[in-house]
Amino acid sequence: MFSLLKSLDWKLNLAALFLVGAGMISLFSANPALFYKQLLWLAIGLILLFSIIFFDWRPYINYRGVIFGFYIFSIFLLLITYFLAPPIRGTRGWLPLGLFNFQTSELAKLILIIFLAYFFSRRHMGIGRVSTLIISFIYFLIPALLVALQPDFGSALILFCLWLGFLLVSGIKYRHLIFALIIFSLLAVIFWQTILKDYQKERILGFIFPNRDPLGINYNVIQSKIAIGSAGLFGKGFKQGSQVQLGFLPEAQTDFIFAAFIEEWGILMGLFLVLVFLFLILRIIKIGLNADNNFNRFICLGTVILLIVQFIFNVGSNLGLTPVVGIAFPFLSYGGSNLLTNLILLGMIQSIFVRRSL
């Protein structure tokens, strides 16, 4: 046991723990009640993380039934969520589990990474075939449609980015990629006309037109920019951020936690936070490059795509560079389901790392 713990990539662990710690401090400042709930999620996530590290799951990935079983289970949960989950802020995305609500779209992201890693690791010789493109698209589209119907446009966008990222790295032909993007563009038009709610359309229009409705759809982004712009190099201090403490910055614990953190801890700490995140990404890439099989490499790839996409959209929305689509900052934002997903993936990557030469 101790020898296995010593063999972990502790640089990766420390980077993740720093991000989690920074998020917990910001949560305690913004909403102590959510801090304690997140603490319980963190405890559960750490238990799962170390359980995955100690459990050698490699033999099971060779069984097609196991991988498809996970995929079907995620679809089943998404269906239950859509038909039975109580609406929370207009979205049927959370299943109540006692004191907690579990967001099933987060599990769908995790399982899609595992499924696509299995799919592409066994079809790398035939990636140029149109059939591979179409089949993989269908596997992505089923959970993405169910998530979009909740409606959760942000999570559906992440699922698309996962699929597209796997295609790009797998060596797809450019003409097939263009064909895929055309199909997606047509689907995007259909989504806009039939699935997207008015408030989601307003968010996108608000991003395109920054001066549109400053007291409505663009209010959050404007307050986020004020929080960041007023922070200075060293911030206003713990519990001293006016935008957060006086309630001017909505969703300071989730969508805009990056702005909330910078307001109290300053631009320099915000830059350091970004550097730690980039270091975490580089460690995962290094582990993936040194992995002993394609499945493990694709697991690392999928994790990198997931984390980077979340980072880009969360930080981008805080700065007004991307639309606000409700995507968390990995390890930093409040959200037990997201934290759990990230910690499980971290456990899988550590398991790949410690068994790379076994």
Image: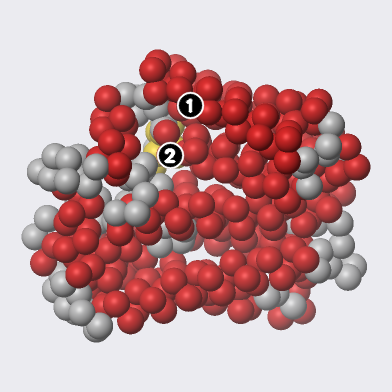
Q: Answer left or right for 21 relative to 302.
A: left
Residue 200 percent across, percent down from the top left: 31, 32
Where on the picture, by quarter, is residue 245?
A: bottom left
- Mark drawn on residue 154: 2
Q: What element carries label 1?
A: helix
Q: Answer left or right for 141 relative to 7.
A: left
Q: Residues within 10 Å of mark 1 (few under 14, many from 20)?
A: some
Residue 153 percent across, percent down from the top left: 42, 33
Check disc 2 and give the amino acid type: Gly
Check disc 1 and give the amino acid type: Ala
In the depicted structure, whether residue 163 falls above or below residue 72:
below
Q: Which colour scheme is used?
A: secondary structure
- Mark drawn on residue 188: 1
Q: Is label 2 or label 1 in front?
A: 1
Residue 132 percent across, percent down from the top left: 80, 31
Looking at the picture, tell me which residue is in the foreground, 245 or 302: 302
Quadrant where the N terminus is found in the figure: bottom right
In the depicted structure, whether residue 132 falls above or below residue 282:
above
Where on the picture, by quarter, is residue 273?
A: bottom left
User: Does the rendering let one see residue 114?
Assistant: no
Q: Is mark 2 on a helix, strand or loop?
A: helix
User: Does the rendering let one see residue 347?
Assistant: yes
